[in-house]
Image: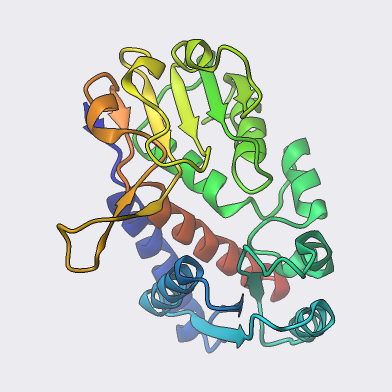
Amino acid sequence: MIVLDGKKTSQKLRTEIAKEVAEMIDNEIRPPHLVAILVGDDGASQTYVNAKEKACQSVGMTSSVYRLSSKTSEKELLAAVDFLNNDPDVDGFIVQLPLPKHINEQNVIERIDPAKDVDGFHPVNVGKMALGLDCFLPATPNGIIEILKHYQIETEGKHCVVLGRSNIVGSPISIMMSQKKYPGNATVTLCHSKTQNLAEITASADILIVAIGSPEFVKENMVKEGAVVIDVGIHRIASTTTESGFILKGDVDFAAVSTKASHITPVPGGVGPMTIASLLSNTLKAAKISRSI
């Protein structure tokens, strides 16, 4: 069994990005600037945004965070989005999800300028992704693609089962894995909470991508011998054995499933670092496009 090391793979991508950013600075070109809008005080979101800040600094990019109260109105948030859309010093920005329940997430996503939508969530970018056109790819699905590529996982003609149909991970990765390119060209089955005979379907997968949002949902009996398993989930589980008082678990029962899988991503250290690396890549791309580099 081979552990698909997202930290190691993402570091390779970060090194390449840092080199390009350094060349921009050497040529007296302003480094790429990524902004994150964080609404409220969700612990997981704060941790993720902090990680993005550190990642930007590690490759020489400029990073800013707009921290807004959980009581921020939708109108106020849309005004902040408009401001960033029109700020020439901002190359790309994200609105960290989830948002407070009184704010319509889709309204906010659709307000973002597609040319600055480095999360790849705007309908324009989603549509281009579905058609195989050049665009900002959603960060987590693209991170999965990059880790499959790094480990030279064979995907052509393979049965890929995606568990979870969110607009952020499940739906886009199902499209990307079916497209006629590498990694991709697979036969894809998209499963969800209403799928019948779920364990039977997942156990037929050569490549199983799990983004169901439930800790250790996938057990040993749901996985084919020799399958490649990509675990997108991350959950804080209370624990008395750690200083922090919690441990991190994925959507896959790693201990049990790793005895059957040929390749598997760990949690943490698997898909998470790849998501951030993909976000940095999109930000660099946005900066190069805006300056015609």
Tell me the residue at 59%/22% (across/down).
185
Q: Which of the image's four quarters has the C terminus?
A: bottom right
Q: Which of the image's four quarters has the N terminus?
A: top left
Residue 4 picture quarter: top left
165, above or below 32, in the image:
above
Q: Nearer the viewer, residue 82 or 145?
A: 82
Residue 231 placement, left or right of 241:
right
Tell me the residue at 76%/66% (across/down).
115
Whole-percent x, y for residue 93 in the image: 65, 73
Q: How many marks?
A: 0
Tell me the residue at 78%/69% (across/down).
112
Q: Is residue 269 visible?
A: no
208, above or below 200, in the image:
below
Q: Is residue 210 visible?
A: yes
Q: Nearer the viewer, residue 27 or 197?
A: 197
Q: Nearer the viewer, residue 292 or 179?
A: 179
Whole-percent x, y for residue 151 in the image: 34, 35
Tell me the residue at 22%/32% (across/down).
255
Residue 293 placement, left or right of 240:
right
Residue 107 picture quarter: bottom right
How has the structure been colored for display?
A: rainbow
Whole-percent x, y for residue 73 in the image: 78, 81
Residue 177 picture quarter: top right
**Which residue is outermost to the left?**
241
194, above or below 273, in the image:
above
Q: Nearer the viewer, residue 103 or 52?
A: 103
